[in-house]
Image (cartoon, rainbow, N blue to C red):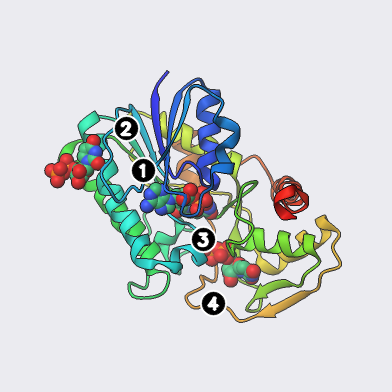
Amino acid sequence: MKRILVTGGAGFIGSHLCERLLDQGHEVLCVDNFYTGARRNVAHLLANSNFELMRHDVTFPLFVEVDEIYNLACPASPIHYQYDPVQTTKTSVHGAINMLGLAKRRRAKIFQASTSEVYGDPTVHPQPEEYWGNVNPIGFRSCYDEGKRCAETLFFDYHRQHKVRIKVARIFNTYGPRMHPNDGRVVSNFIVQALKGEPITLYGDGLQTRSFCFVDDLVEGFLRLMDTGDEVTGPINLGNPGEFTMRELAEKVVELTGTGSDIEHRPLPQDDPKQRQPNIDKAREVLGWQPTIQLEEGLRKTIAYFDGLLSGPAAA
Ligand code: NAD
Ligand code: UDP
Ligand code: UDP
């Protein structure tokens, strides 16, 4: 049994990770400032004596005694990370410094939730880990993209300079239960719109692509990466290579929800990447990992979650 710190543990992915780690018998310290996360995401874990929830902002130092760290703290949806872009960069950069300082002091293994956004608007498809990316340093998405890139730099410098054991995962679009209904990401938007019978907002011509990984598959990838020997640092892509256009996604959501909603076109946001698909050869080879949950099955589970949320007492 280990003592494991999960920053951003009350968020969408973090809450699933806390759940899995507790299932494995570990002690979990969930640290979150509830910027985009919510107590309700981990409410079902509070009765577990191995679980501890602490309100804390990772841009400030944190002195706790843990064996492993999963650093997930950072708003992930464009609406949230662009709301206070300075805080977004601070969270990625100062948060990484503090968590790396903690890992260094504790000689703890540390996992970083990096992102496919480090590839920016890629000119190489699909993106292998060796690709350096095509990122606008001064645009609206830069606080997130460059913050995450700088965090990666810090991880590799702490590794080379201080021998910190690092595990860097580049996560591609992930979806599933406990996504925020209002965070503007495409899967939650389309499902909520369909369930409410509102128009489905397709940005641009809808021919841009994304590859969607179901959250349970992703968390399995995290655990496998954390379990590797010290020679494995990453970065390693984690995502589902199944690539879909946003039009296809909209049509699938309409079909699965049986909604009468129409698909309406809206302007494409600035710097919106045209195509994104992970190359997961490395994850297959090093972790023996690949996603097992196909889009339709994952969408059904996510639709069921939002259906419950929208018809539950909180919706009234
Ligand atoms: P989320 O917004 O649900 O979770 C992020 C959590 O971090 C929230 O609980 C939030 O309150 C917390 N947080 C934010 N700033 C903080 C701070 N300064 N101190 C402490 N806690 C703070 O997002 P998510 O989708 O669960 O993403 C988790 C991680 O995975 C993020 O680092 C994100 O960048 C990364 N990621 C997610 C995706 C995706 O598709 N969901 C893709 C790539 C990378
Ligand atoms: N830090 C922390 N928890 C710890 C150890 C360090 O939050 O258990 C912070 C520390 O306050 C510092 C940062 O991590 O701001 C980086 O630590 P490091 O030891 O690398 O740098 P230094 O303290 O020498 O500036
Ligand atoms: N998108 C859309 N309608 C929406 C929300 C998003 O068509 O209501 C598009 C968006 O323009 C982008 C894709 O869906 O091309 C994925 O957007 P999201 O914000 O989920 O993720 P990211 O752009 O960060 O990959």
Nearer the observer, disc 1 or disc 3?
A: 3
Residue type at numbered disc 1: Gly
Ligand 3's quadrant is bottom right
Give the numbered dot on residue 77: 3
> Mark 3 belongs to which amino acid?
Ser
Label 2 and label 1: CA atoms lie apart by 13 Å
Q: Is residue 109 above or below residue 127?
A: above
- Which of the pair 264/297 is nearer the observer? 264
Task: Write down the residue under mark 4.
Answer: 269
Disc 4 residue type? Answer: Pro
* Residue name at image x 38 percent, y 25 percent: 3
Q: Does the residue labelled 4 lie within 8 Å of ligand 3?
A: yes
The structure residue drawn at horizontal position 33% and vertical position 61%, both measured from the top left corner, is 89
In the rendered image, the quadrant that contains the N terminus is top left
Label disc, if present, on residue 234 of the rendered structure: 1
Looking at the rendered structure, the kind of residue marked 2 is: Lys
- Which mark's residue is nearer the viewer, 2 or 1? 2
Distance, label 4 to label 1, CA atoms, is 31 Å
Q: In this view, does 196 lie to the left or right of 7?
A: right
Please tell me which of labels 1 and 3 falls first in the chain: 3
Residue drawn at 56 percent across, 24 percent down: 23
